[in-house]
Amino acid sequence: MKPVPGDRWRGVAERSWRPAALLAACLVIWHLITVTGLVEAYLVPSPGKTFDLLVDKWSYLWGHTWVTTYETILGFVIAGVLGVLMAVAMVYSRTIESTAYPILLFAQVIPKIAVAPLFVVWLGFGFEPKVIVAVLMAFFPVVISTVTGLKSVDTEMLELAATMGGGPVKTFVKIRFPAALPHLFAGLKVAVTLAVTGAVVGEFVGSNEGLGYVILQANGNMDTPMLFAGLIVISVVGILLFLLLDLAEQLMLPWHSSRRGAAVTTLLAKGGT
Amino acid sequence: MSSGVIATSAVAIDDVSVRFQSKRAETTAIERVSLDVAPGEFVSIVGPSGCGKSTLLKLVSGLLQPSSGSVTLLGEQVRGPRHDIGFVFQRAALLEWRSARRNILLQAEMRGMSSVEAGRRADELIEMTGLSGFENALPHELSGGMQQRVALCRALLHEPRVLLMDEPFGALDALTREQMNVELHRVWRETGTTVLLVTHSIAESVYLANRVIVLTRRPAVVKEVIDVDLPSERDYSATMARPEFAAVTAHIRELLGAATGHD
Ligand SMILES: Nc1ncnc2c1ncn2[C@@H]1O[C@H](COP(=O)(O)OP(=O)(O)O)[C@@H](O)[C@H]1O
Ligand SMILES: [Mg+2]
């Protein structure tokens, strides 16, 4: 039932080799495209050249990476806290739900890139407008997933809770919120990747630091190796934050991930034979 | 509590009707049902699907209010969710992140019972229901029968004087179901709790009960109340083999056949 450590590592290896192989294939194709001269070198730099640049300009990139990561995390945390609070309010009050939903939807469908300049006008070139765009991007999935999670609780479980006489606070803390956590984590994982996009979009619009700024500068100078390097670093930041949340989920919800892991392993075992 | 002055009924359902209002139609689930259950009695309720059996248990627990009539539980009229009962549903409704033991203890935590007392009581019940060795298993590691035992322990933790069970063994295989019947019978004899059991199994309803209430198709009306005249100490196979048992089950089957119009 509980996987022994050896099993778990084999599981990780089994899960990882396909994506790793795909990534390697992509790198090879990229390399081939550049060495065959299919595309001009100033349009697509070779992987080697890009990685050389990553190493050479590491300290320059590192500073900007830190700025973007900081904005992302701050935006993500604010969106997470506000999103969960909003979801709880919506689940417990019909009035709040019906009032907030249209506004929430409006905030979601409005293109963030179009409103970002407004925040720059209001708040200047500092980190604040970037954080706000990140919050706007990340907020919606958190609210929707938490609402779904809180509503996913069995009515029978809630009826039982009523006969146990714990009151709404205990029912929330011991039953509803923990039951919502798997949904909440799914939403947080989407949210964190969107927060990265939000921070970069914010930087595009008006900034003198961050990876969005790096890309914009590289673009202006036709410095494609730097542009590619910037893109790679942004992706890595997004992936690392995602994996961090995945790890947190596995640590906090072993009951959930063990079952999910079991399902994945079964699938792989079936697919492998 | 204030009871004990007079030997009143544990549960008194007095001329109760329940109507559900939906957008267009009004459904009468229960029509003028009256029923008295004595303290310590085991009463089974059988009837066609959708006739209002679950509704009846919800009335007794206060999860639902009657449209007319009144329900009295342990000498006190039911006006809202009652905390002096235990409830077991068809689905175990366990919290999947809690072990078997901690699922049982949820009852204590919600009530703010002393944890030492609750822990001792939980261990007692785990022992009594044969859950020993599975205390730390998560629900998905338990069989359906085991999960239902956990639900039963949780319902009994606070020593309720009335236990309500809504098709608790409906999802179990026949053999597990028989085992659970034997165990429930023993638990009932050991605890002296008043039990209201809704079931689809006629054999189960008779084996366990002092009385069987047969309801008609919706709207539910009490069709007949059958006194089960079997010794209170009931060995499973011996009871099944008794001629009275066969006669009573045949009679109920006939009543239900008439109630459902032979479907
Ligand atoms: N909350 C509700 N709203 C509307 N109709 C309901 C509701 N609960 C039950 N009913 C109806 O009342 C009838 C009795 O339901 P129920 O007590 O669950 O039946 P049983 O448990 O005997 O199968 C059914 O026809 C059902 O559709
Ligand atoms: Mg029912």
Image (cartoon, grey):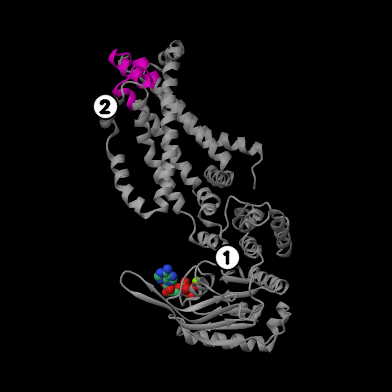
Residue A87 placement, left or right of A108:
right
Residue occupying the point 41% across, 52% down:
A91
Residue A36 seen anywhere in this rendered image of the structure: no
Give the percent coordinates (x, y) of residue A183.
47, 46
Q: Residue furthest top?
A: A56
In the image shown, does A85 or B171 lie closer to the viewer?
A: A85
Residue type indicated by callout 2: Pro
Taking B31 as reference, is B172 above or below it? above
* Residue where numbered disc 2 is placed: A117
* Residue where numbered disc 1 is placed: B83
Q: Where the N terminus of chain B falls, by quadrant?
A: bottom right
Magenta-span inclusion, residue A207: yes
Residue A57 seen anywhere in this rendered image of the structure: yes
Q: Residues within 10 Å of mark 1 (few under 14, many from 20)?
A: some
Question: Could you give the CA–CA distance between mark 2 and mark 1, rounded to whole angstroms?
Answer: 57 Å
Q: Disc 2 is attached to a residue of which chain?
A: A
Disc 2 secondary structure class: helix
Residue occupying the point 38% across, 76% down:
B27
Residue B256 placement, left or right of B118:
left
Taking B9 as reference, is A90 above or below it? above
Q: How crowded is mark 2: few (under 14 residues within 10 Å), some or many (20 or more)?
A: some
Q: Quadrant of residue B199?
A: bottom right
Judged by its main secondary structure, the magenta piece is helix
Taking B161 as reference, is A236 above or below it? above
Residue occupying the point 48% across, 41% down:
A185
Q: Give the range drawn in magenta.
A: A201-230
Q: Which of marks 2 and 1 is in front?
A: 1
Give the percent coordinates (x, y) of residue A210.
38, 20
Residue type indicated by callout 1: His
Label 2 CB less than 8 angstroms from ligand 1:
no
In the image shown, does A260 or A23 lie closer to the viewer?
A: A260
Residue occupying the point 61% across, 51% down:
B98
